[in-house]
Each structure stands twice: as structure tokens, then as C-alpha cells.
Amino acid sequence: MVRIIQRYHVGGLILAITAATSAIPATACAPTPIEAATRFLNARAACDFVTAWAMLAATERAALGSRADWTSEQSADAIGQLDCHSRIEDIAIEREDRDRAMIDYVVARPVVAVEFQRLQIDARFAPFLEQRRLESALTDLKLRLLQQNQWEPRIRTAESIAVVREGGAWCAHDGYAEAAERQRQHERQQAAARERRDAEQRQKDRLNAEAAERGAAALPFISIDAVQVGDTALREPGVWAEIVNRSRETLRHVEVRIDLLDRDGLVVAERRFSAILHLSTRTSDTPPLPPGQRRRFGYRVDMPPSTWARRARIVVERVEADPTAPPRDPPPPAPPRPQQGARQPAPVR
């Protein structure tokens, strides 16, 4: 008596997995290693996963859980690769000990099964423009499946399987228990990595919030001195100024707004610029600005409006303190340096 345990659609075909419903014991191991491997491999190649389950060692079944879940999972995977039409050949003992033996064998898979598996992998990682090519290849594969002798020719590969002795009989040990343990270990490692990333992100968020809070408190003590408009060495317009830190904080980020003014002092354009930017993830950072220090910065003005009268006003808009540096009382700021004329070195963008 035969019953259908699952149906799958593959390339437009309806394929069914069948299994004998005759009484199969919970375990049906064999008296010899060769017979155990032969029964298990032939059952799996024929997609008779009920019989294959009964041939597994107890440690394998314990690692896999329920028979229904395993047979369903194996059925879906085998149908996806069209491996239900494989043949097992040249089974031989490679090594045998008292309680364990290694069995070598050759599996002859249909070429279409190998091609289908390759197309599945290509479809998983292919860019959008490759979808049409893959769809055409799958269509051609459907036509080959409908032809006579659809499972020929075959590709033969050498493989091996372990069998172990349990209670005087030999059972298949195909590495499911080890694979399950590796999967559990991988999941534990992934969970630990996620926890580390989450902890690092929480720490980063906490430091950023502290930097913004301490920077907001320091903002009234940050000023701009010695604003100057001139030309760079390449005769491009630019704005220079000095930022003065009269707060107790070491500044890692200071964002300023540069207002370009017309002859009447009205704003005709705005530019925003990070006069101080010190982030550990960047290699082109400017150093942080300690309390009581001043630093000159420049900004090259690209495509200024025609109404700009080469006048500028600079306003400090946002400040972030360095959360790793403790607050300290600043010394008096150094006096501004004397200006060296209208021409300045090329400012940093």
C-alpha cells in the first residue's frame, strides 16, 4: 500500500512523494555496515524518507526532532534539487572499526537536477537584469523534464557516509547531529554578536546623547572672531574666521552657518560648514578644540550669488562636546592672531 505524503510544484510539474504505509518500526537498522548504508542511501535517493528515518541512528533522530518535520524538510529539499531520481552505485567499505564504519559510494544525479540546483543558486544572488535569462533557462529545463529519458544523462560524484553500531545492529550516521550542533553553535554565536552590536550601539547612543547635551550647555560660550572675506591662492572667494572656545568642554563638533550678505546687510545665501569635526570613524578629522583655545578655519564659497557684496556673518548653530573628555575650567582665550591680508591659504570645505 502506498500513500502520497507531499506534493510539490517544480518547473510547472506536479511531483508527488510517496511512501509505503506498511508497518515500519521506529528503528530498522541492519546487521552489516554495507546493508545499513545501502538501505539508507537507496531510501533517501528514492525520497522514501520514512524508511530513511528508521535507518538513522538514535543520536541522529534525537538531534533532528520529530520524524514528520524531518521528512517534510528533506522532501522539500530533495524535490527542489530533483534528487528523487538519483541512483546509488559502487557502495564499498572504506574503513571499519568495532562500532563505526565509513562507507564510500557514488551518487549518479540527473544532469537536469544539477542544472536546476545551479539555477536556484543563481536566482538567489542574481541582479534584477538577470531575471529574464534565468526565467528562460528554467523554461528550457521544463521542456527537457517532459521529454522521454528526462533523467539522463547523469553526473556521478563520489561521497561517503558513516554507519554506527547500536544495540548489535548498524545504523546510518549521516552527520545530522553534528550539523544540528553546528547550527545551534552558529545561532549562539550570531546571538552573541547581535548582543555585542546592540550593546555597542547603546553605548554609542548614550555617548552621542551626552555629547549633544553637554554641547548645548556649552553653546553660549562659543564665539566667532576675526571674520574675513578674501580670495584663495587660486583666486576663489572664501570666508575665514576664528572659533573661540570659552566653555569648560572639549569640542568635537561645531557646525556654523555662514550668511552671505549684500550691500544692505541682507542675507542672499546661506552655507553650513563643520568648523570642528572630530569623529573616530574618519581619517580626515580636525582635532578637538580644548577649553580656552581658538582655531582659525576657512570656507571656499562656490557659486556665490551675483548680489553678494563679499560680506559675511558667521553664527554657531550646533555644538557637540567630547563625551570622553571631562569638563575643566578653561584658561583665558588667546588673543586673535593679526590678519595677514586678504589672501589666505585655500580653506577647507
Image: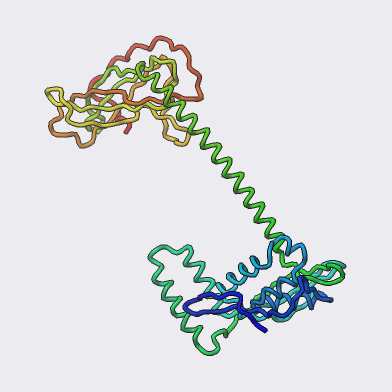
- 328 up-or-down from 277: above or below: above
Quarter holding residue 224: top left
Q: Is residue 86 left or right of residue 283?
A: right
Residue 262, how many percent across, how many down?
14, 26
- 279 or 228, nearer to the observer: 279
- 192 or 226, nearer to the observer: 192
Q: Is residue 339 left or right of residue 56?
A: left
Quarter holding residue 274: top left
Would you say residue 102 is visible in this rendering?
A: no
Label total for image: 0
- 116 up-or-down from 146: above or below: above
Q: Work out which quarter of the rendered image holds the N terminus and state it.
A: bottom right
Would you say residue 40 is visible in this rendering?
A: yes
Give the residue drawn at x 86%, y 68%. Answer: 167
- 134 or 294, nearer to the observer: 134
Quarter holding residue 73: bottom right
Give the residue drawn at x 34%, y 22%. Answer: 296
Q: Residue furthest bottom?
A: 148
- 127 up-or-down from 217: above or below: below
Residue 86, how many percent across, how many down?
63, 79
- 51 or 170, nearer to the observer: 51
Residue 92, how many percent across, how many down?
77, 77
Residue 212, how many percent across, how many down?
42, 26
Colour mapping used in the image: rainbow
Q: Work out which quarter of the rendered image holds the C terminus and state it.
A: top left
Give the residue drawn at x 51%, y 79%. Answer: 14
